Image (spheres, rainbow, N blue to C red):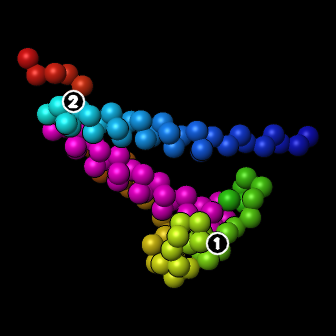
Amino acid sequence: MSRRKRERESPDMVPFVGRVARAMVKRAAEGDLEALVALRAMQSAIDAATIDAARALHGHASTEYGGSAYSWTGIGRVLGISRQAARQAFGRQGSVVSDVAERETPLFDMQEDA
């Protein structure tokens, strides 16, 4: 039995994330200071996920899904940076997403002040 290849939904997520970010900007423009805090937390989460994804593409994690590891040159090329910059930015080991999740506080309280 062969494993079914995972569907790729990344391109579909980009417009969604953009809509969420624009909604937070609108909330901030209406005077919601917590929206700014939420945007900053979203930025941190996306940065951490980018680091983990680059490490997975470069390391052995990508081979678990039938792919092969990418070079720092290839990763840098798609991000518009040099091989050296890619290696410096993403080369350290460990999961950044889990570290961010452990230290982040809730984005904002969903209850409105009375």
Query: Residue 28 at x, y = what percent?
Result: 20, 37
- Residue at 68% x, 59% y: name it: 62
Residue 102 can be seen, yes or no: no
- Residue 93, compared with residue 84, is above or below; it is above
Instruction: Give the farthest residue toward the bottom.
Output: 84
Q: Is residue 108 magenta?
A: no
Q: Nearer the viewer, residue 104 or 43?
A: 43
Instruction: Estimate how packed mark 2 is, as few (under 14), some (14 to 19) or many (20 or more) residues with alpha carbons within 10 Å.
Output: few
- Residue 29, compared with residue 62, is above or below; it is above
- The C terminus, quarter of image: top left
**Label 1: which secondary element:** helix
Q: Nearer the viewer, residue 21 or 93?
A: 21
Mark 1 vs mark 2, CA separation in Å:
41 Å
In the displayed structure, does residue 44 sit left or right of residue 4?
A: left
Q: Quadrant of residue 99?
A: bottom left
Instruction: Give the farthest residue toward the left.
Output: 114
- Residue at 41% x, 35% y: name it: 19
Q: Nearer the viewer, residue 104 or 40?
A: 40
- Residue at 59% x, 45% y: name it: 10
Q: Which residue is mark 2?
A: 109
Q: Which residue is mark 1?
A: 74
> Which amino acid does the dot numbered 2 rest on?
Asp
The answer to whether the residues at label 1 and label 2 have Cβ atoms under 8 Å apart is no
Query: Residue 90 at x, y = what percent?
Result: 49, 70
- Residue at 91% x, 40% y: name it: 1
> Which amino acid does the dot numbered 1 rest on?
Gly
Q: Which residues are magenta?
A: 32-61
Residue 107 tag number: none
